[in-house]
Each structure stands twice: as C-alpha cells, then as structure tokens.
Amino acid sequence: MAQENLARKIDGDVYARLDAAIDATVTVNADRNDKESRFPRENLRALSEAGWTGVLNEVQHGGLGLAHVDFAEAAYRIGQADASTGLVYVMHVGAAQTINLFGSADQKERWLKSNNGGLLGTYSTSERATGGHWWYNLSEASRDGEDYLVNAEKSFTTSSGQADYYVVQTRTPGAKDQADIVFFIVDGKAEGIESRPWDALGVRANHSGPIRYSNVRVPRRDRLGTEGQGKEIIYGGVSPVYLIGLGAVWEGVARGALDAAVAHTTSFVHKDRNKSLSDYQAIRQELGAAKVLVETLRPWRNELAARLDTLWRAGKPQSEILIPLTEFKVHAAEVANKVAATALTVTGGYGYHRGPIERSYRDARAAIAMGPSNVIARDWIGKALVGLPLELFYEGGE
C-alpha cells in the first residue's frame, strides 16, 4: 500500500506513536467528552506530542513532512475511537495545509513551527446567512491603514472558542463580486472574538459552534495569499484536504461501530439457548452486509489520497479531483450511518444504552449535514456527470 511505502521514509515507530496516543488518550476520553460536551484538548495534545498534528508540515516547520495518504490514515484511526477528535484533527490539519500551500515563509514560521508545541488551528468559513453553502460569504473585510478589520458572524466553526488560530474567509474589501474573496489567519486571542456554546445531538465534543468577529484587527502580514485569491484557495487548498479528511473520519466511525458490534455479538450468550448472538444467521447477515460496505472505503481513500499527493508534488491544482473527493465524502457518510444503524440493531438494548455504539449512531448523523451536505454534494456530482458547471458563485445558483 502507498501508505506503508511512505511510512518507511521516516522512523519506524511513527505509526506506533499515533496508535499509542489514540489508545491511551483519545479512546479513554471519548465517552466522557461526549457526555460533558468537553473539548478534547488532552487528545489533541497527545496527538501533538506524537508529532501528528504537523503531519503535512515540512520538518523545518516542526512537522513530520508526510503526505495525504498518512494524514487520511491518521484521520481514519482517530475516527474509529472518537469522531469529535477526528473532526477537530481534520480541521486543524486542513488549516495548517492551507498555510503550507498559500502562506508566506513568515506565516509558516510563526503559525506552523509551533504545532508540536500545541498550536491548534481550524477553518472559520460558513455563515448563518448562507447555511451549508460555506464557500459563499456575505461578510466583507475592511481596511484600516495597512491592517484589516474583520466583522463576520460565522456558524459551525469547529473548535470555536478553542483554537489558537482561525483561517477565516470573507469578501475582499470593496469586493467586485461574490467570488472576490480573501483569507486571513486570525489569532485566537485577538480582541473582538466571541464564541457561543455548542450543544448538539452528536460530535458533542468538537465545539462546532457559532463565532462572531467584531472589528477584529488582522495585521497585513496575516493576510493569507493575495486579495481576491480566495476562490483559488477554496478550490485548491481548503476543499481537497477537508473532503479526504472528512471521509476518512466517517470511515473510521463505520469501522469502529462494526468492530464494537462484532465484539458484542460474539461475546453475549443467550443462556436459555446457549447461543451467542453471532450464532443466529440473521445477525451474521446484518454484520456481513455492514462489512461489505466498510470494505469499499479503504481502497478508494488510499487511491484518492495518493492522487492528492501526486498533484501536490507536481504543483498542480488539487481541485482536479474535487468531484471524486466529494463522491468519497458522500459515500463514507452514508456508510457510517448504515453501519452504525446496523450495530445498534444487532446489539439490541446493549447498543441502545448510552455508550460507544449509541455515540457512533449520533455522531454519524453529522456526516450527512457537514458541508457540502450529501444532498448538495449529490447535485454537484450529477452536474459533473452531465457536463454542467458547478456555478458555486453564480447569483441564484448553488
């Protein structure tokens, strides 16, 4: 596998460190964080200490210098233990990678080099006024001398109120049209940032709540890329990493739910018949159908991640495979929901009781809604199939 070949280029225990952090911290904290809606700070610290929060960053910037194949594998393994931590991780790596691709040397030195010391980043893009159309903003930055002022009300910002920096998207000051977009790196400690509580059905620990920026001053040195380059950043930086990471997390949720269901059905015995649940053909058929679905994801994930790496190394736009990445996200989300539902069914009252299986069922529901929602994403896929443009920034369109 491509992932195994890449892993051989670094010290042999790099994946062992990842697994140790997941086993000792992420898995242990998952249920507590879900019950308390507690941000998984300890989990991210453990992943940082293992080096994995800088998975795509160059070594000189404190990273592992690995590839998308490795990032997606890490997101998958984390997702098996805890979807909330997986989503925080994906948004962090995506924000860092956007800086890797479009940031200045100064920005990489200040915001990325400290990743192993615990700096946590995230995207802050979607707005209440445009809902799941996170790429379409109505907020517009203004200028104050050499600096910028950001006034925006963002919705569903993962790690809201917790991140050390936000990769924020608004329209360029004096924007000519809706596609005239600019990105900023906003210090999480800047004055004028107000986050609100997060209380949801699932992924209760990822703090994906609203955040308001009120006259937040951003130095010119923390403008990401050039004014008007935002559309390119959305297509070539934000979306590809986000989509492969999301799909990998939901693949992990599906695998984790299946493993939990198998463990329970093989160990629980009906004393009146002296049969385990797995001795019943009906149970085995449900598990078998779920297994087939889960196995469709890994080869696809590795193939897409490898293509991202090829495009990255060649300096080509990763948006070339935007639609296949979207297809993967849609399928992974639906598989996670189907497999979690199966796990709940075959484990009966045990699965329904609050715990890992019930949590996976609630968490998986978020997969359908996360932008692009599966409903919108399927229309993207259909448009590409029949040769129509996406028209994401078309007035009255998507």
Image: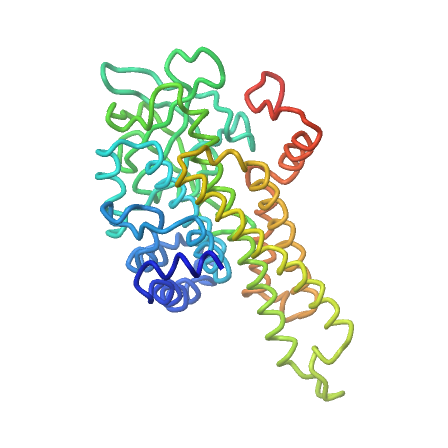
- Please say if 284 is above or below 344: below
Which quadrant of the view contains residue 276?
Answer: bottom right
Residue 68 coordinates in the image, percent (x, y): 43, 48
> Could you tell me which residue is drawn at 66 percent across and 58 percent down?
293
Q: Is residue 392 visible?
A: yes
With 114 as the anchor, is 200 left or right in this view?
Answer: right
> Could you tell me which residue is drawn at 30 percent across and 26 percent down?
223
Which quadrant of the view contains residue 227?
Answer: top left
> Could you tell me which residue is drawn at 54 percent across and 51 percent down?
301
Residue 104 coordinates in the image, percent (x, y): 26, 31
Observer-nearest residue: 135 or 365?
A: 135
> Could you tell me which residue is drawn at 66 percent across and 37 percent down?
378
Residue 240 coordinates in the image, percent (x, y): 48, 39
Observer-nearest residue: 254 or 324?
A: 324
Position of the C terminus, as image quadrant, is top right
Observer-nearest residue: 7 or 52?
A: 7
With 367 as the anchor, is 193 left or right in this view?
Answer: left
Residue 306 coordinates in the image, percent (x, y): 48, 48
- Please say if 362 is above or below 374: below
Residue sitting farthest toward the front: 314
- Please say if 126 is above or below 80: above
In this rendering, the count of numbered labels is 0
